[in-house]
Amino acid sequence: MPNPVFVERGAENCYTEGMNGNRKLPIGIQSFEELRREGYLYVDKTDLVYKLATEGKQYFLSRPRRFGKSLLTTTFRAYFEGQKDFFQGLAIEKLETEWKKYPVFYLDFSRAGDSYADVQDRFTVWMGELDKQFKCRTSGYPNLSERFGALVKRVSQKYGPIVFLVDEYDKPLLGTKGAERERIRSLYKKIFGNLKGLGEYFRFAWLTGITKFAKVSVFSDLNQLDVISMNKAYATLCGITQAEMEDNFGPEIDTLAEAQRLTREACLGTLRKMYDGYRFCEEEEIPGVYNPFSLIKAFGEERFGKYWFESGTPSSLINFLKKNVGKLRELPAQDKIVVSDAALTSAYEDNNDPLTYLYQSGYLTIKSYDFRRFRYTLDFPNDEVRYGFLNALIPYVTYKKFSTCDALKIDELSNDFEAGNTASVMKLLQGHLSNLSYQEGPDAAMKAESVFRNVVASIFLLTGQMVHTEKHTSQGRIDSVVETPEHVYIFEFKVDKPVEEALEQIERNGYATPYAADSRTIHKIGAVFSTKTRTLCDWREVLG
């Protein structure tokens, strides 16, 4: 059998340092070959690459955006093309002995357009490139599905079984809806269906995306795909564990700590709080992972930023918030977010549960799992995601734009909490709640209280303080508790009722009892929202 036609990219410049001896951080580098050729730092995941390549045949993996899916996919490409030199010094070098070359069909949708015509053009151009690379002539086939099938057969018969790699398959689907999305689905179904119908011609198949969509051929028809999105063996395949960070980025940690005037331990604590916390399986002994993009950006810029959101809040999130705001208003005020296992493993459109989308796209992550009841507890993975998401959500909850001025007042609110300045806290809160919108009707007060409570929970969470919302006690549920190193604030909210009623509830239900032995100052606060003025109209504080 003749050797496949491959583009030899060369690896003669593979090393771990740049030309000037400085360590090069792979910010925005999505190509494994470029990363290795140009000497960027690399967190070695090739032992798992080898395990996947040798133990199975067809896989699907979902991970949030900017989590290294493209880098991983191009690692498979280099491996199956037999580019041995790129893997010098990595774990796979000791595992692989043959380094066979296979014809690789690599398809990247990350830069594809968001229309059926764009997707059709992407397939057409890609198949033309394959024709040229493997010296085939398939342009005369009547449709793309038949053309792809012909390519698979001809290339496989001439060069050996095919490796098929698809990156970010759902990018066009996330940007479309209605009939346009259905047309893209239908095209996917016809083309990707060849994976099953012509399975004997494939050596390996790998598909990645952010979410798992219903009614797409790769899931409804291709039941042979091994979905490893929540497989504990591959939970750390994308992302960086605590041990990997400390082992690989020691100098960068020290430099960041020095730039921020922190001790090394304090710097590690802030990194953990900002970027760690993602969990992709229910096993608690499996370590969580950091968002690799944000972590490496923090090292590169020597500061703690909200890089995941600063890189662009995806339009799909904005559209999602608009569509599901009624279901999401309660999210900030929930003490625990508990979902069934089906909510995380099924496609979003199968169950219409917005929490499915929020988990699969990385805005929520697994915190614990009840093996007896098959229930997951979810939460925001870290502060970067928590504050970015709440900033995006607030305009749709309050029906008003959250301005830069509002953001600055959030910082002021946080400072007032720390200083024990309740009067200023309530004044700033009143400003945030002014002209709050809600639906009119016979149960307007009930609706107003719900909106009021959820908006307050969102604002409190944005301060960065320790916040408990709807906190359960033996006697009831506290609306909100805010804790700082020196103060504990216990809030009870009412709508169109005397403020005394709120304070009486705090006392009657013993909401302050859990803090009786606490050395901090206890603030018991009753607050009233008016449906006439649509803002905070009265409040009263009792200390101790």
Image: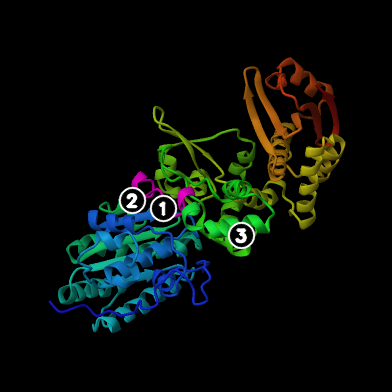
Q: Seen from this angle, which residue lies furthest top?
A: 508
Give the camera-side residue of 461 and 293: 293
The stretch drawn in magenta includes residue 233: yes
- SS state under label 1: loop
Q: Which residues are magenta?
A: 227-244
Residue at 72% x, 19% y is 516
Q: Which residue is mark 1?
A: 212
Give the camera-side residue of 358 and 366: 366
Residue 337 x/y as whole percent? 54, 36
| Tally of numbered tags | 3
The stretch drawn in magenta includes residue 90: no
Q: Report how far apart the C-alphas of labels 3 and 1 lie in the structure.
A: 39 Å
Q: Which residue is mark 3?
A: 255
- Could you tell which of marks 3 and 1 lies nearer the N-terminus? 1
Q: How is the image coloured?
A: rainbow
Q: Main secondary structure of the magenta part?
A: loop
Image disc number at residue 227: 2
The type of residue carrying mark 3 is Thr
Quadrant position of residue 80: bottom left
The type of residue carrying mark 1 is Lys
Residue 104 x/y as whole percent? 28, 71
Q: Report how far apart the C-alphas of labels 2 and 1 lie in the structure.
A: 10 Å
- SS state under label 2: strand
Examine the rendering and report whether any part of residue 191 can be seen.
no
- SS state under label 3: helix
